[in-house]
Amino acid sequence: MKNIFLLWLILCLLNGQSMNANLTLYKNGYTMVKQPAFWNVVKGKSQITYSLIPNQLFPDTPFLSVKNGVVIMSQRVNRNIFSSDLYFKSKLGNMVEAYPKDTKSVYGQMIEFNSKSITIQSKSWVKMIPRDELTLLAIKDKVEDVQFRPKLEWDIKASNSGHINGDILYMTGGIEWKSVYRLITSPNEELAELVSEALIFNHTDLNFEESQLKLIEGDLHKTTSHRPITYGPKMLQSMRTQDESLTQQEMEEAPLGDYYVYSIENNVSLIPGETVTLTLYSPRDISYKKKYSFEKRERQKKEEP
């Protein structure tokens, strides 16, 4: 059983895939994610990490809730993702080999590196090479522990060794949805069927597999339109309590102040770059009458000079 769990975890990390998360989607592109997670810890102080988070995470929002006698001492959002620009800037003063277009390679000490050019010097010359003319830049080095995704890190203290589980709660952007209503009329033009659907767009870099969805017909209020929203742990706990209290009945709509909550019964996978169409609630039969309205419009022409 342990080997199966480790294999599943490795596959998720390689593919950027979240499993069995609870997603609450608001109309203005904000999503609250409740992600179950598991770790194997040792007794005493240690560090646990989690890297299956989307690239549009709001860094002030993650909150971890764990049980099993574990105390969380600190939390960090590690966004030290490998960048070639940052890497070569940190190598100023090292010997490099540059390959400009249609000319021989240049070997020497790199004394400048910016977005427009690099500068290399040797014992007898200094050469500046524009970046748009540079085909390759090489340095003898090896990068250790390359990080491809942002990750969350926690320093914890556990009372016992073994497996622990918890829930990671955070806010992210990049997942949007909108409602679409279709009216299918009958031949007698008196009865019709109202069909309601939801279109969901995943613009993040994370694959949310087998997720439970709640769609909120309303906007999540925020302080400004440019800053990431920030929530403290107490507010996140209250949001999580409210999230757990919502019923999960099939295609049910429930009033929540100025909001409507649509709970989707079946689990849904949200693949990056794809659009998913779901039914909000069962089709409804309605009756209607056609009315024609005629308006008299007169054009007034200006007199020509």
Image: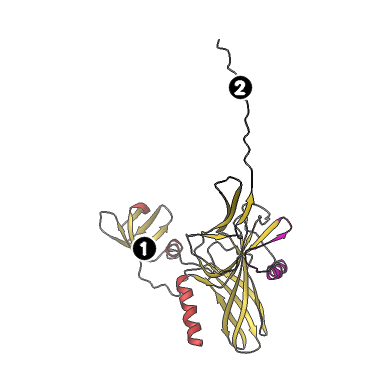
Q: Position of residue 101 (x, y in %)?
A: 28, 54
CA–CA distance in space, label 2 to label 1: 80 Å
Q: Nearer the viewer, residue 97 or 249?
A: 249
Q: Which mark is residue 203?
A: none
| Outermost residue, front side | 188
- Residue that lies at the very extreme toward the right in this rendered image: 257
Magenta-drawn stretch contains 247: yes
Figure label count? 2
Q: Quadrant of the C terminus?
A: top right
Residue 186 colored magenta?
Answer: no
- Which residue is farthest top? 305
The residue positioned 45% from the left and 73% from the top of the image is 14
Disc 1, SS: strand
Residue extent of the magenta highlight:
234-258
Of tags 2 and 1, the one toward the viewer is 2
Q: Is residue 233 visible?
A: no
| Image quarter of residue 223 | bottom right
Which residue lies at the image location 35% right of the left edge and 54% below the top edge? 129
Residue 11 in the figure: left or right of residue 197: left
Residue in the foreground of this view, choosing between 19 and 299: 299
Q: Secondary structure at mark 2?
A: loop
Residue type marked 2: Glu
Q: Quadrant of residue 28?
A: bottom right
Q: Position of residue 123 (x, y in %)?
A: 32, 61
Task: Where is residue 145? Give x, y as percent.
Answer: 46, 75
The residue that disc 2 covers is 298
Residue type, numbered disc 1 = Gln
* Residue 143 visible here: yes
Question: Which residue is located at x 72 percent, y 59 percent?
Answer: 255
- Left or right: residue 7 versus residue 283 is left
Q: Which residue is mark 1?
A: 109
